[in-house]
Amino acid sequence: MAKDRRARLGEDVVVPTIRDRDSATVVESASPLFNARGIPIAHEVSKAARLERDHYERLRQAEATGKVVQDLPVNLIRFAPFVNRSDYYFSSERYRQFRDSIKASGKLDTPIKVRPVEEGSSSYQYEVVFGYTRLRIARDLGWEKIPATVEQVSDQELILAKFRENADREDLSVYDQARTARELLEAGFRGDRKQMMAAVNRSNQWISHQLTIASIPAEIMAAYPLLYQAGYDDLAELGRACKSDEHNQRLLAERDNIHTDNPAVLVRKLCRLLQEASETLASETAEVFRIKDPQGQLLAECKKLSKGGRTLRFTAEKGAFADYVMSQLEHLYAEYHNSK
């Protein structure tokens, strides 16, 4: 009977089904159809549905752990706010060489890593976790898609991973490393130094030095790109010298007057300018006493500086009197000393 039924229906029998990707639900026809081996087709369909369901379950698990490489649209991926590269790098010869090598090969050897963006918070669907430079190159080259893995990553995990990645990089500047450390402290650990010290195995003094370097204003780094080649101690010294906006403006104003190819020499010149600016500012805010002669003409000005020092300046017309005072200073001091 089964053989006759198969003969009437033919060897290839199609069972109408409705299949759902997630649940793998199958709605079978009411007729008990059989295949060429005499096995009910409904059994084979159910087995296939189970295999398909298991496949998608494994796929979901792989996607959750970031093990599946997908081709994602470039225009759906945004840059993360935590960037360990400055604009200086993206205008460098190293970046151009990297971009040209990718352009020549037409592909990426290593996929980028992204994390999902909260639904409804942005027009983007993903945010780059690793591969900021590769994503930027893909945009520069006009690529429509880029290979990527998708993984759920918190802000703290993201910045901590970037920090650890930076520790092995030789081409990352001291300044960019310091900026990443500051981001890790502020955004990753909400300013908790003890937690950060334990997580990265660094001392509190090391964190303080990183913050000092990161405090150098970005506009000064942009005005003097050679600073990106400066060493740790030099940048720490410059960071300590950058005390106020008034001082920093002096560096920007003198940009065209400083010429050197040595990063250490540049730091020393900038620190000297900052010291002069500090002294000038102190002088401008000092208390001034004006001394006049019996005819009411200005004789000299005495400035009481904010740090406790004094300056005495004679007018040009009273040069002879100034010479006399200078010659009597030793005698005047002796009288002062004996009177105490």
Image: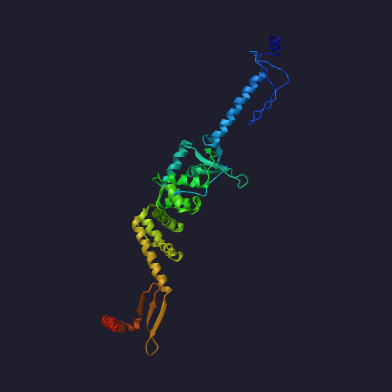
Q: Position of residue 148 (x, y in %)?
A: 52, 38
Determine if residue 259 is in view: no
Q: Is residue 37 left or right of residue 248?
A: right
The residue sitting at 40% across, 52% down in the picture is 203
What colouring does the structure picture have? rainbow
Q: Position of residue 228 (x, y in %)?
A: 40, 53
The residue sitting at 44% across, 47% down in the picture is 199
Total marks shown come to: 0
Q: Quadrant of the N terminus?
A: top right
Q: Position of residue 163 (x, y in %)?
A: 44, 47
Q: Position of residue 328 (x, y in %)?
A: 27, 83
The residue sitting at 58% across, 28% down in the picture is 55
Task: Determine the residue located farthest toward the right in the rendered image.
Answer: 30
Residue closest to the eye, 126 or 337: 337
Q: Is residue 58 left or right of residue 271?
A: right
Task: Determine the residue located farthest toward the bottom in the rendered image.
Answer: 294
Which picture quadrant has residue 208? bottom left
Residue closest to the eye, 300 or 226: 300
Determine if residue 206 is in view: yes
Q: Is residue 57 left or right of residue 31?
A: left
Q: Quadrant of the C terminus?
A: bottom left
- Relative height, residue 310 to residue 212 (above, below): below
The residue sitting at 41% across, 71% down in the picture is 282
- Relative height, residue 42 to residue 61 (above, below): above
Which picture quadrant has residue 252? bottom left
- Relative height, residue 294 to residue 217 (above, below): below
Residue closest to the eye, 6 or 191: 191
